[in-house]
Every structure is written in C-alpha cells, then in structure tokens.
Image (spheres, rainbow, N blue to C red):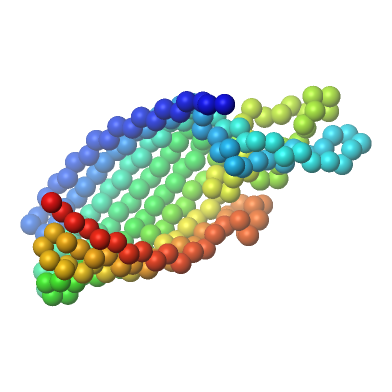
Amino acid sequence: FWTDKDSTEALIGVSQLLDKKTVLTADFTFGHDEGYLNDPYRGVFFTGWTGINNEVTMPVIRPDHRNKEVLQIGLTHFFESANASLEGAYRIYHDGYDITAHTLALNWHQHLGKHLLIEPLVRFYEQSEASFYTPLGVPGYFPGDGITRPANYSADYRLSHFWSLTYGLQASVIIKEKFYLDLGYHRYEMRGLDDVTSPLLYPKANIFTIGLRVWF
C-alpha cells in the first residue's frame, strides 16, 4: 500500500568577513518530517512468550513525525604565503528521535599552480542513540504474555550510539576555465559505543570517486 511522506526544511544563514582573508559562516536549519518514516527493509526480533522459546521478525515502527534542528558554524582562512585555505566547521544536530549528534571537520584547499587543487580532509562524527532503539529485540509479541509492547522500535544500527571517521584526499584538475576533473579517495570507519550492538554491523569502506564539473 502507498503512504505519504512530507518533508519541509527552512534554513537561515549569515556570512561575515572578519578580515580580507577570513570568513565566518553560521546557519540554522529546522526540518519537519511527517508520514511514513519507517524502513521497509529492516525488521526487529520479537522474543517468545511464556513456556515457548521462539522469535518472530516484525517490521520496524518509527514515530510518524520528526523535528530536526541543526546549527553549523564554519571558519575559513586564506594563507597567502601557501596559496591555500583552511576550512573548519562544527555542526550540532538534534531531532525528535532524541538523537544528538556532533560533527567536526577540517578541510585544506591547496592550489598547486594554475591547474591543480589538492584537498585533504578529516571529519569526525558522534551521535547518541534514538529513544526507541532496541538492538536486543522487543519482548512480548502476544497480548497474553503480560508485557506491553512499546509504541516504537527499531534495531537499525544507524540509530545507535556510535562514532564515525572520514579522512581522505581529493584532487581537482582544472582542464580549462569552468571545466574540472575531480579524483578522490576517502576512508570511512564507523564504530559502536553502546557495548550491545554487534561490531559486525558497523561498516568500513574505501571510497573512490571520479567526476566532471562544468559551469555554464
């Protein structure tokens, strides 16, 4: 069956020149999601009832609405002697799932001549777990077992308490004005912090990218 999902976001931001080489940016985003917010491809174990050892997999049930608040502050400074700039950013996120997340990022933009731009970066992210995260399953599948089933539940590891780290390098070749070739490699690592969720669920990945950018 079909179910609607509506998402609305509003953003307000400001950029302030601190001097001719330094820019401070700040923006705040408010978002609201409503409708079908479940993941149809994930399930939750419901453990058995009195006298019977059994488990039943049921679809996850997330709340049907979520508010999101995001504040991000960035500072970029150009180092004339190196012909490069350093960009730092901090982001704090909170939503109706009771998830609070912090992100720190550093990005170095290094010009090498007129036709090459090198950009190493590192990004650290940590979040708390959702209020309805149930990595060990949900007790009480049948009404007669005397256990009240929670209104919302999910064992999706992406709702757990974890940190992730991204680092890598991107190179942009300026073939001609308004025509760029991008090549990149990034390493992504994630690790759980709740001592309950299986470490095997958290992915690690080597990410290679290639692309073209054209401005008209």
Give me the residue at 66% from left, 45% from top: 135
Q: For the N terminus, which image quadrant?
A: top right
Displayed quadrant of residue 177 = bottom left
Residue 212's x, y, as percent? 25, 61
Q: Is residue 178 above or below residue 91?
A: below
Q: Is residue 140 visible?
A: yes
Relative to 96, 122 lies left or right = left
Give me the residue at 65% from left, 36% from top: 59
Residue 198's x, y, as percent? 65, 56
Relative to 133, 25 lies left or right = left
Relative to 102, 169 lies left or right = left
Displayed quadrant of residue 125 = bottom left
User: Which residue is farthest bottom?
Assistant: 113
Q: Is residue 92 above or below residue 151?
A: below
Q: Is residue 82 visible?
A: no
* Residue closer to the observer: 88 or 134: 134
Q: Is residue 27 above or below residue 118?
A: above
Give me the residue at 11% from left, 69% from top: 80
User: Which residue is farthest right?
Assistant: 51
* Residue closer to the observer: 146 or 214: 214
Q: Is residue 137 above or below residue 79?
A: above
Give me the residue at 33% from left, 67% from top: 184
Residue 178's x, y, as percent? 13, 59
